[in-house]
Image (spheres, rainbow, N blue to C red):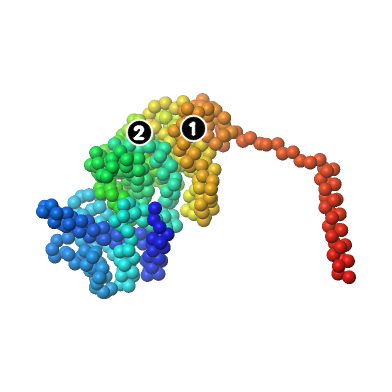
Amino acid sequence: MITGEIKNKIDQLWTQFWTGGVTNPFTVIEQITFLMFSRLLDIKESTNENKSKLTKKPFKRIFSTVEQHMRWENFRHLEAEEMLKVVRDEVFPHFKRAFSNGSTLSEYMKDAQLMVVRPSLLVTAVNAIHELPLTQGDTKGNLYEYLLSKLKTSGIAGQFLTPRHIIDMMVKIINPQPTDLICDPACGTGGFLVGAMEFLNNKYMKVYPGDQLFDYQDHIQNKLLSGFDFDSTMLRIAAMNLLLHNIDNPQIHNQDSLSATFLEKFPLFAENHYTVILANPPFKGSLDNEAVEPSLVGKVKTKKTELLFNFLFLRMLKLGGRAAVIVPDGVLFGASKAHVALRETLIEEDQLEAIISLPSGVFKPYAGVSTAIMIFTKGGKTDNVWFYDVEADGLSLDDKRQPIPENDLPDVVEHWFKRNDEDNTDKSKKHFFVSVEDIRSNKYDLSISKYKQVVYKEVEYEKPQIILDKMFALENDILIEMNQLKEMLK
């Protein structure tokens, strides 16, 4: 966790960017990220230099002899005008050269550019970032998460950030392993991928002390995490987000995963590849059929992205692969042929394990849409589906989203892992099973309101005569007090 003092510093830096003319929130985060990255490169170079002195072994330098002035510790002492010139004309072009090796970072560094035009703003930003504790454990990752939380406006195409506590719950339910292949086909800023990595670090910290998960490092760095998105700005932020969480080469690609070119460009990733999918795809509305991969619309004719993405998830998963995905409530009860076909596929051809209904304010202030989490496994057999009615997530369900005591999320995780050992037949409770026969008989309707039994408590009222007597007595008391007041005023 980061302290209030550090949060204040970030808040002040954010304000400085806005008053300095950089007002797009994605651009602000991107520019702060580049500067944090510049400082981290210098820290890494200094660490390698010290190690080389001790071991007497050479190392591959990030900065050559003639590039030493581009290092953070050198340019941060320059005068404002000179600093701007060096950072804009030399440091940012150096990012492109230093990462031209075909890695994920090289893809998103190739068009890196400084958007700060005021020398005074750059000096302020550099000084502020220099005071941030980027070398203290995973503080830099927590810093970045706080930066991302400041995105208060939704992106294009129905994109909005998934709250971190919702991500954490979904990751805990899926319980990923270090050998998994994890993907978010609409990854945005990489929140689900970071959440999965942090879960693994926390879970295996005691098993692999010191160098966490060291037996799986090559897999983790190069294969564990994959993400796709068509927004290059968000992808750059995602790549940096993962870098600041110590993932050097995630498979982050600029690609619309619903498009007709996805299967052609990424044949390995697009079909029967992943063991885990975690996602909150955009609920854009409709796409042109010509723009959609034919294998997706071949299953059922639809233009709705919330349906197409779920067919995509099933295609991308290996047999036995698991998914936890957020869908708008319309997916659960929509009556169109496409809506029913998706639900029938999940029930009859795969194993639909759970529907976790979320309250409508979870995504405020971005959107007030009602949503649910679907948990399913590719292949297998659906015998019954576990439902949970989340009424509170620990935050108020208005635009302010202030902390409150009520929180069902820990209870969801607890009962998820105990669900097959409990008596889950009482449909008046928060969680219960519904048999596949009941779901079939209701035309595959998966809305929790279809099955949850609302228990109404009978309210007993006093007899009318008693209520009238009380009203007369109250009126009499008022008259007595008014007469007393009248006597006092004489």
Q: Residue 414: image x %, image y %?
A: 46, 36
Q: Residue at x 32, y 42 (%)?
A: 205
Q: Residue 339: image x %, image y %?
A: 47, 37
Height in image: 406 above or below 422? Answer: below
Specify whether residue 256 is in view.
Answer: no
State the residue position of label 2.
321
* Residue 74 left/right relative to 446: left
Tag 2: amino acid? Gly
Q: Which residue is drawn at 42% across and 26% down?
A: 381
Q: Residue 119: image x %, image y %?
A: 30, 72
* Mark sitting earlier along the chain (2/1): 2
Quadrant of the image occupied by residue 149: bottom left
Specify whether residue 278 is in view.
Answer: yes
* Label 2 residue SS: strand
Which numbered circle lies on residue 386?
A: 1
Q: How crowded is mark 1: few (under 14 residues within 10 Å), some or many (20 or more)?
A: some
Tag 1: amino acid? Trp
* Residue 418 left/right relative to 274: right
* Label 1 residue SS: strand
Q: How crowded is mark 2: few (under 14 residues within 10 Å), some or many (20 or more)?
A: many
